[in-house]
Image (cartoon, rainbow, N blue to C red):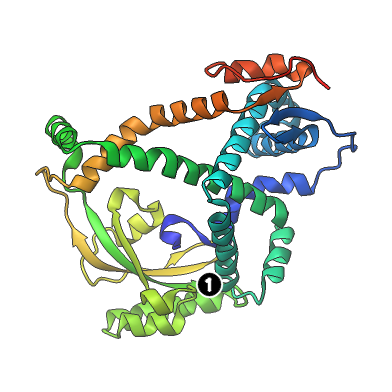
Amino acid sequence: MSTIIKSSISGTLVLFLSIAAFAQETQVTVVDEVVAQINDSVITLSQVNREKALVVDEFIKAGKTREEAEREVSEKEGQLIASLITEEMMRQKGVEIGLDKSIEDEINQQLLSLVKENNLKSINELYDVMRGQGIEPELWKKTMRAKRMQQQVLFQSVDSVVYWETSDQELKEYFAKHKDKFLQQESVELSEIFLPFAGKSEADVEALAKALVERLRNGEDFVTLALEYSGRPNVDQNKGVVGEFNVDQLNDDIKTAIKGLREGDISDPVKWDIGIEIVRVDKYVPASTESNFDEAAVRRAVMEEKAPEARREFIRKLREDAYIKIRENYRGVVTPFLQDTPQKETASTDS
């Protein structure tokens, strides 16, 4: 993936930088206990405490004092446990429909891509880099696994169903009522040359980027230079092509860099934390005031409106069909966040 949409080791891992809190915990170890049972799996007190520590760390990063953060997280404990219950139900559903292997392969591929993008020699070297940033690799993978499982379960079981179940007549009626949603947006097709800082001085990379921009603007072949210099692991396959984007969806730095450029123009170098990006505008399509019936676009619009309620109903049904047993001393704070679904508990006392 490109830094055009914010990626690579700093872009990807920063989403989970709060994981560092886990690696830095110094809390006294306590005897674990089961907080909730979901079918044949359990959520333990240690899991809850770990999640609380991560959220506390996020709140502190957002500017709260530790005391404020811990108080707010304590007040949200029931909501947090309810979220863990939902996450576990999603995991179980994903395994049931056979998503676990493909998600594991996806995570492994992402790790390999990070190794290549950052000019590292192995996964173990990547893990060392992650630990150096305060990120525990196994917990990062667990977080990614849960995130992707939820996304894929909802996409396959809800979003794609809603997408395809809309009839042709519904699509036409929706388009007629919402023509303003289907105006031609300003869009671009982009290619890139990415020059990573890894293992090099920033000054040398900046000098190379400046020289490449000059060579490109003087007519040298973009693909040839991309194959020779770009640090992207898939450059041999895509020849530097990134894809097509609506301009308003672009990263602000990229949007600024290509402002005023037209087809074939080369941007000035765009500097990121991990490297420098040179962008070529391959195609430019200006905005239009005419509506265009594009079935895929109309289906997506209908899906985006229907999906939130359909997802809530899907989760409600998951809870309804599951065996969920919450430990008595947590039940009062957790149940309100599960009240939209009657809980199926076959036992009323805790073991």
Q: Quadrant of the N terminus?
A: bottom left
Of 45 and 67, nearer the camera is 45
Of 316 and 58, nearer the camera is 316
Q: Position of residue 309 (x, y in %)?
A: 39, 27
Per the image, label 1 sits on a secondary structure element best described as strand
Residue type at mark 1? Pro
Q: Is residue 261 left or right of residue 229?
A: left
Q: Is residue 248 above or below residue 128?
A: above
Note whether residue 11 is visible. no
Q: Is residue 176 left or right of residue 124?
A: left
Residue sitting at x 37%, y 58%: 254
Residue sitting at x 67%, y 67%: 126
Q: Position of residue 297 (x, y in %)?
A: 23, 45
Q: Is residue 118 above or below residue 94?
A: below
Residue sitting at x 44%, y 26%: 313
Q: Position of residue 139 (x, y in %)?
A: 70, 50
Q: Is residue 277 above or below residue 250?
A: below
Q: Position of residue 215 (x, y in %)?
A: 34, 83
Q: Is residue 16 left or right of residue 189?
A: right
Of 330 and 16, nearer the camera is 330
Q: Residues within 10 Å of mark 1 (few under 14, many from 20)?
A: many
Q: Label 1: which residue?
A: 196
